[in-house]
Amino acid sequence: MLDDHLHLDPVQGRNTEAVEEFADHGGTHLLVLNRPSWHLVDAATDEATFRETFDLTVCAVEDATEVLPGRAWPVLGVHPALISRLLEDGYTPEEAGDIMQTGLDVASEYVTDGPALAIKSGRPHYEVDDAVWEASNEVMCHAFELAADGDFAVQLHTEGGEEFEEVAQWAEDQGLDRQQVVKHYSGGRLRGPTKSVLADKDELEIAIEEAEPFLMETDYIDDPERPGAVLGPKTVPRRVRWLLENGEDEAVRVAHVETPEAVYGIDTEATLDR
Ligand SMILES: [Zn+2]
């Protein structure tokens, strides 16, 4: 079983211990997101700092794979809230957008020439002014362009809601299949991209009713200062067990085998060592 979106922090977090907890409860595969760059440096403004944050995640993923019966993959990118940090530091929205696009260029290099599986982009989940919103959408469209060129998926961090048809259209305008756009932290119902549903029972029930492809995630943040801020690493395996007990074998197959294969091209069965 796959957790589609979880963070590991090899510097301050539980890191491999969290992965062990996931595996102990039956978890097999993980997509590990880099933590926002400002947890490591004040704010990433150049290629070198982005590389530094990405390399940390790549190392964490190697360690995670050691303790998993399956494996982990890195998903690397630029947190959309970085734009606000950069504005505070005196950059204009355009300059901030350029810096973030540089980060995405580096991330996509880690996919095409390195160990990463996909990139992450998006736009702020909070109210921003028009110039910031516009620059953020441009950054996100740049991510779509990179993903279309390299034939890989993009995870999105965005505002909440169910209506993302326009965003899926933008991806298609860049030549990217909308299926390869994954809205992380999604509810059970979503128009547009593929949904990565937070492993909440009610939302999972809605996702199953909707009968569309979906993924499951915890968005575990591995931050010792915010214990319990999000779902713990054992939540996806627990929810899978609950689904199986309720006869939802088909939904489990959709979320853990078929959708990961369709979106990322990964085989969560062949990569199991048993
Ligand atoms: Zn996250």
Image (cartoon, rainbow, N blue to C red):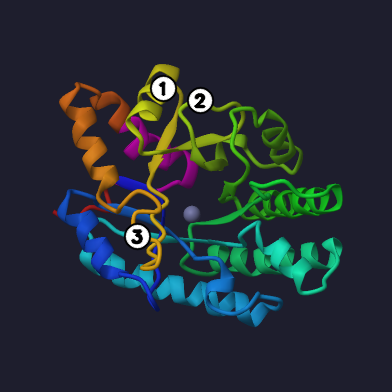
Identify the mark nearer the N-term, 3 or 1: 1
Residue at mark 1: 206
Asked whether the viewer can see residue 170, the reply is: yes
As helix, strand or loop, the secondary structure at mark 3 comes to: loop
Please state which of residues 274 and 134 is positioned toward the viewer in this rendering.
Answer: 134
Q: Amino acid at mark 1?
A: Ile
* Quarter of the picture holding the N terminus: top left
Query: Magenta stretch: residue 171 in it?
Result: no
Asked if 242 appears above or below 78 in the picture, the reply is above
Identify the mark nearer the N-term, 2 or 1: 2
Which label was assigned to residue 227? 3
| Magenta span main SS | helix
Range shown magenta: 253-268
In the visual, does 77 lie left or right of 17?
right
Q: Residue furthest top?
A: 209
Please state which of residues 222 and 194 is positioned toward the viewer in this rendering.
Answer: 222
**Disc 3/disc 1 C-alpha distance (Å):** 28 Å
Q: Amino acid at mark 2?
A: Arg
Report x, y in % for residue 138: 79, 51
**Disc 3/disc 2 C-alpha distance (Å):** 28 Å
Q: Quadrant of residue 85?
A: bottom right
Asked if 8 appears above or below 80 in the picture, the reply is below
Q: Are marks 2 and 1 in contact (CB under 8 Å)?
A: yes
**Disc 2/disc 1 C-alpha distance (Å):** 7 Å
Residue at image coords 59%, 72%: 38
Which label was assigned to residue 189? 2
Residue at image coords 76%, 49%: 128
Report x, y in % for residue 125: 64, 46
In the visual, does 246 lie left or right of 147?
left
Asked whether the viewer can see residue 269, the reply is: no
Report x, y in % for residue 70: 25, 56
Q: Are marks 3 and 1 in contact (CB under 8 Å)?
A: no
